Image (cartoon, grey):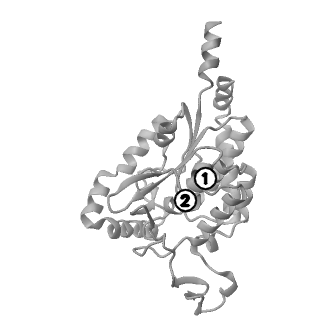
Amino acid sequence: MLLCCLTAAAGRPKVGLVFGGGGAKGAAEVGVLKVIEKAGIPIDYIAGTSIGSIVGGLYAAGYTATELDTMFCRQEWLTLLTDRRSDIGGEPYIVKDGVTYIFGFPIMGEIKESVIGGFGVMRGERVEQLIDSMARCKGINDITELPTPFRCVAAEFRTAKEVVLKNGPLSRAVRASMAIPGIFKPVNQDGMKLVDGGMMNNLPVDVVKAMGADIIIAIDLQQKIDKKPKSADYELTMVTGFAELLGIDGLIKWVFNRPDISKYKANVKLADIYIHPPLPDMDASSFGNKNSARMIKVGQEEAMKHWDELMTLKKQLE
């Protein structure tokens, strides 16, 4: 009797869900979500990095796995990520509303106050607009208003320090978390210049644990962390971006210490249920309807391998 009273007073264990970064591979996280929903696991806290901040933020806002599946498979990601305007995509050169476009891609013009100059080509305005619109459809204006508590990870590039975003517009936090150096321009917030959180913490298990999670489910998109990226051009862009952001001395220190790898390995061990969809032939740029559908399926299949663990967790929560 005493044990029952103590259990009731303490309440059930709190569950945290972590979405790792990985660009287009984020579609696999949606597949994992479908299985978690099927298992009936309640989620109390969510944390994400980069593409994981998009999936996690929208899930925290109340979107279901099925709705996110539709978003990934129907969204024109090239247009979304590059701010390309399809209505003028056939024009080799045109200036419209103060912005210069080449075949619909913006290359020069007015930049929002929150998006600063510096190394990086894309401004990510359309991604920000999409997330803002989807959040407002759920009545959300600020991260603190999300039905499920949410945090996303960015990095301050001048100091190479991790920054956990927990308030302000969801769209701006997500935009900062996915600002890959050398590709997207940094985001200016509270005097900080923020870039992709994967630079410091690509699987923020420690973040969701700090939020109060007792049991943590982590979805990891990284494939063979010690292996070189599939695309040499992508690797060069990242290294060049870091050199621009940190300076040569800072870049050497970062490469030598690789704080992201040491934290990643520690966070993998910290997860209670670790789900790692195998996507060896996919990289961060593998967007597209067919690729997304395939990765969602891979995510589902991998999550089903953990079905017994999820059922054990469900019984524990009951």
Q: Relative to 246, is 256 above or below?
A: above
Element under disc 1: helix
Q: Where residue 53 sits: x, y (%)?
A: 56, 54
- Residue 161 visible in the displayed image: yes
Q: CA distance from mark 2 to mark 1?
A: 8 Å
Q: Relative to 123, is 295 above or below?
A: above
Pick the front one: 294 or 216: 216
Please report contact status of discs 2 and 1: CB closer than 8 Å, yes or no: yes
Side of 311 relative to 221 (left or right) = right
Q: Earlier in the sequence, mark 2 or mark 1?
A: 1
Pick the front one: 82 or 13: 13
Quadrant location, the N terminus: top right
List the residue tagged with mark 1.
57
Q: Where residue 35 sits: x, y (%)?
A: 70, 41
Q: Amino acid at mark 2?
A: Val
Q: Where residue 93 sits: x, y (%)?
A: 58, 93
Quarter occupied by residue 172: bottom right
Pick the front one: 293 or 251: 251
Quadrant location, the C terminus: top right
List the residue tagged with mark 2.
174
Which residue lies at the image location 59% right of the left edge and 93% below the top edge? Answer: 94
Mark on residue 69? none
Q: Relative to 92, is 25 above or below?
A: above
